[in-house]
Amino acid sequence: MNPSVRVRDSGAEHFGRTQSLQAEVVVVGAGISGLTLALRLQQGLSPKDESTQPLLLAEASSRVGGCISTQSKDSYRWEEGPNSFTPVPALLNLIAEVGLAEHLVLADAKLPRYVYWEKALLPVPLSPSAAIGSRLLSVGGKLRALRGLLGFVAPPPGGEETVRQFFRRQLGSEVVERLVEPFTSGVYAGDPDQLSALAAFPRIAGLEERYGSLFAGAVQALRSRYRYATLPRTRHQDSGNSPIQPPPKRGQLGNLRQGLQQLPEAIAQKLGSALRLGWRAVHLKRDETGYRVGFVIHDSGAEHTAPEEIHWVAAQQVVLTLPAYAAATLLQDLNPQASRLLREIPYPPVAVVALAYPEEALPQPLRGFGHLIPRSQGLRTLGTIWASSLFPERAPQGYHCLISFIGGATDAAFARQKGIPPITALSPDERAQIVHAELSQILLTRPVEPIRLGERLWPQAIPQYTLGHRQRIAQLQASLADQTPGVWVCANYLDGVALGDCVRRAEALAQQILSVRR
């Protein structure tokens, strides 16, 4: 990891003996959502008086970034959280704004993705011609999928559909088992029998909701793309207004040369003294002028033997950019309904295991994004990213860095079925041994011991958009607006878990808060 942003000072000296610190907006949590939101607020807020600072961003830990965590060892570099991003405009603008445009690295969009099926790595078909010749689906499975793509499907049922129900009705059981299920594990570490199709895959499921069928929606999208392509365009418009030139191509994934951690650290440098590390929010109360947030402040390296003192910050508006379960704890007394709704959002455990192997022990050449594994294949690993095939400077010459994921929403049931412990009951060594054994079966061409780079267990990893999620979030937002106006939430459990979604959502909320202030 590049830990350039650490606890510089706790900020406790800002508190007098009798007077609490006052801020117009307090943002709790310095993950990518909180950092982006704070940056945009900082740019739009100005001091109203000398006693109130415009913005305070508080982070409980000694580093910024939340689940973004880049690690390095010797000449290896790997991610413990998100591994890449789709280079959407909002995210590219942010990267350029904080001075990282030259650090952007893009994976070749033509690199194949694989699914491990019946003891073979089979490429995912990404075009109609590839689908025809693909071994991943049988002839019957292809014909069933084609029928669905042409619009010959049963009408939607009256109630909300799970991911499995929606895609099985649209494209058939084979597509679900061999493509949708592993993809759902790759994005959400989720269970297709529990996730809401409209919440988890809104762009696809929404086509039927808006146009009556996937086929009609795809036709409409092609028409719109054609109309856009035939409009008179300037050279500036042809570049897509992208701050990155040349603009990324469709299907590419991005990272930064020294890892994703570069982005939160660069934003943190822009925020300066508005950012306080080692500030853990433990209370949120209402007062006559707005709200008060209670913090326990930890000095870097200090011993904590005395009872923890609560430091209060008065705020007119408070934004919680924490995971749902953490936000629920802060809101349990102030807004019990919002707290209950937040606690209904599950987070399954996921372990990230980074291993390295010599080139000669792997297929030559090892080119691809990586592979996903359907649960029906009887393995524990959800999938593996071939990190050094995607981005430069991830492994020394002659070696490959592989990042595997184990756990997820289906792991507990899988473990019960097999009579084995869940991943949370295993040691790091045991999880690494499972991953290595399964990579030996899937990918290695000869027996070899791996280089153990690192392992990270996220006990509560990715929010699950289960059935009723959209209604749950609507009720949450309504409860906050009605019961606690001026308290906001902004995190990846709302409407998109990708980094680009977090940036989009944070920038939109910043505009909303600034407009309310005016």
Image: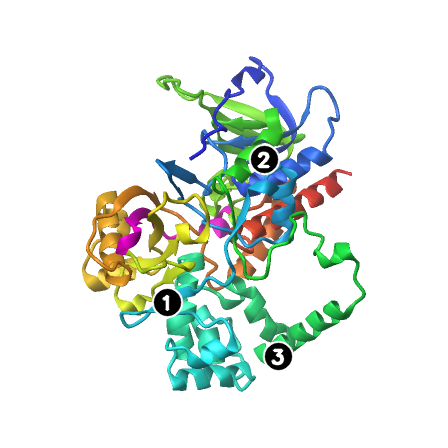
Which image quarter: residue 75? top left
Which image quarter: residue 315? top right
| Of the image marks 1 and 2, the number of the one nearer the N terminus | 1
**Residue 267, label in figure:** 2
Q: Disc 3 to disc 2, how far (Cα)?
A: 43 Å
| Of the image marks 3 and 2, the number of the one nearer the N terminus | 3
Q: Is residue 70 left or right of residue 355?
A: right
Q: Nearer the viewer, residue 403 or 447?
A: 447
Q: Is residue 417 left or right of residue 398?
A: left
Q: Nearer the viewer, residue 339 or 387?
A: 387
Question: Vertical placement of 235 versus 201: above or below?
Answer: above
Quarter of the figure with the N terminus: top left
Question: Residue visible at 40% across and 67% down?
Answer: 181
**Helix, strand or loop at disc 1?**
strand
**Helix, strand or loop at disc 2?**
helix
Q: Disc 1 to disc 2, how far (Cα)?
A: 37 Å
| Of the image marks 3 and 1, the number of the one nearer the N terminus | 1
Q: Mark 1 is on which residue type?
A: Val
Q: Residue 105: x and y, percent?
A: 53, 48
- Taking the image as drawn, is residue 170 in sight? yes
**Residue 212, label in figure:** 3
Crowding at mark 1 (Cα within 10 Å: few <14, some 14-19, many 20+): many
Q: Mark 3 is on which residue type?
A: Gly
Mark 3 or mark 2: which is in front?
Answer: 2
Quarter of the figure with the C terminus: top right
Q: Residue 482: x and y, percent?
A: 64, 48
Q: Disc 1 marks which residue?
A: 115
Label 1 close to label 2 by CB (< 8 Å): no
Q: Residue 239: x and y, percent?
A: 70, 56
Report the span colored magenta.
339-361
